[in-house]
Amino acid sequence: MLNKPGSEHTEKQNQLTRELEWVEALQKNREKVFFDIVGRYKARVYYLVRNILVSHDDADDAAQNTFIKIWEKLHTFRSESALYTWIYRIATNEALTLLRRRKPGLSLDDVSEELMDTSFSESAWIDGTETERKLQEAINKLPLKQKLVFCLRYFEELNYEQIATITETSVGALKASYFHAVQKIETFLKQSI
């Protein structure tokens, strides 16, 4: 039900070529490269952290912090991974840092339970069909690790190796997390529709 085909292979090759060009251009004009990165990834970073954090204000803060870190660390990017993988790792870490700061001393599992209580009925962000609202509600009920893996795989269409780089988790564990997330979402949707 929730299996979504990946992007075309040629698009990924084109993206990799553009990223390599950015890295080369970085040596010549850091500011221009940074603004190109912001223009290209602003929306994707926002929606990635929004899927994790739910709150618009928190997502704005995490996205802004992500681009501040990118500006500060851009000179350290070495093309060992794809640029978007590097950016997503920074964004994911910023979202998780914000969650930890919100409630110091809470584990990520405790933070996940707090996020489960978030109501989507009054959210301006979720204005789609009832099924879309139910899907977002089901995603929000997932444990944080499953939620992160699901969002990176389903919405961002990253492969398991890319997600493993971002989350520093084995591919096998990610596949299991994604499988369990899909099962939980499907069960929730069947029960609520």
Image: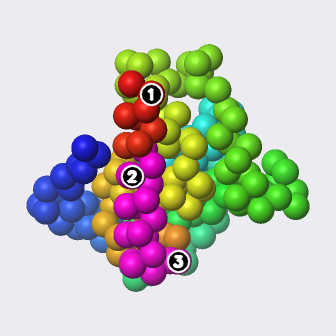
Question: Residue 166's x, y, as percent?
Answer: 49, 70
Q: Is residue 21 left or right of residue 188?
A: left
Q: Is residue 92 left or right of residue 112?
A: left
Element class at badge 1: helix
User: In screen coordinates, is 154 left or right of 8?
Assistant: right
Whether residue 134 is visible to the viewer of this picture, yes or no, is: yes
Q: Amino acid at mark 3?
A: Glu
Q: Nearer the viewer, mark 3 or mark 1?
A: 1
Give yes or no for contact between labels 2 and 1 (Cβ–Cβ under 8 Å). no
Residue to which mark 1 is pinned = 192
Residue 96 vertical placement versus 184 (above, below): below
Q: What percent of the width, then of the height, locates residue 177?
A: 45, 65
Task: Answer whether labels 3 and 1 touch (C-beta < 8 Å).
Answer: no
Identify the mark nearer the N-term, 2 or 3: 3
Q: Magenta residues?
A: 168-185
Q: Which residue is mark 2?
A: 183
Q: Residues within 10 Å of mark 2 (few under 14, many from 20)?
A: some
Which amino acid is tagged 2? Gln
Q: Residues within 10 Å of mark 3 (few under 14, many from 20)?
A: few
Give the residue at x 63% y 32%.
56
Q: Earlier in the sequence, mark 2 or mark 1?
A: 2
Relative image position of residue 1 (x, y in whole percent)? 25, 44
